């Protein structure tokens, strides 16, 4: 999402270094204006399809589809190329 652009570089570096969960953000409210951030949880976990697919596969699930989707219900300030949400269809064999 657009408000996490400054985190994106850290995320890419963590992923490049092989971290299993590169999207964990501690102090999530720092990415928001104070009038919004005070009401948010400290811990947030951003995901991409490859990470979500890996975690589900490691848990023994069969993954049918993993993809990003647009969140048109988000304000335009938060929208970013239709990749605001991530979802997966997986099942237990």
Image (cartoon, rainbow, N blue to C red):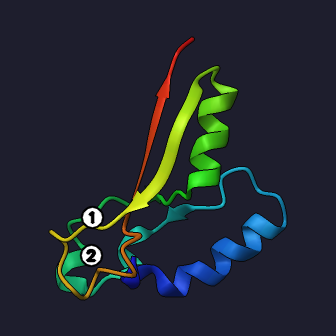
Q: Which mark is residue 57?
A: none
- Alpha carbon separation for disc pair 1 and 2: 5 Å
Q: Is residue 7 left or right of residue 34?
A: right
**Residue at the disc numbered 1:** 40
x then y, percent, for residue 79: 30, 80
- The residue located at (39%, 84%) in the rendering is 2
Contact (Cβ within 8 Å) of mark 1 with mark 2:
yes
Q: Is residue 10 left or right of residue 5?
A: right
**In terms of depth relative to the viewer, which is nearer, 29 or 71?**
71
- The residue located at (17%, 83%) in the rendering is 35
**64, above or below 15, in the image:** above
**Residue at the disc numbered 2:** 37
**In terms of depth relative to the viewer, which is nearer, 90 or 1?**
90
Using a 10 Å C-alpha cutoff, classify the residue at mark 1 as few (fewer than 14 neighbours), some (14 to 19) or many (20 or more). few
Quarter of the rendering occupied by the C terminus? top right
Q: Secondary structure at mark 1?
A: loop
Residue furthest right as drawn: 17
Q: Secondary structure at mark 2?
A: helix
Residue 37 in which image quadrant: bottom left
x then y, percent, for residue 4: 45, 80
Q: Is residue 45 left or right of residue 62?
A: left
């Amino acid at each position: 999402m657009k408000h996490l652009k400054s985190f994106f570089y850290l995320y890419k570096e963590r992923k490049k270094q092989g971290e299993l969960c590169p999207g964990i953000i501690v102090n999530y409210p720092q990415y928001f204006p104070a009038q919004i951030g005070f009401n948010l949880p400290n811990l947030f976990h951003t995901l991409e399809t490859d990470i979500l697919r890996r975690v589900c596969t490691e848990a023994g699930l069969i993954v049918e589809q993993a993809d990003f989707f647009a969140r048109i219900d988000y304000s335009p300030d938060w929208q970013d190329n239709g990749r605001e949400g991530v979802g997966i269809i997986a099942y237990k064999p």
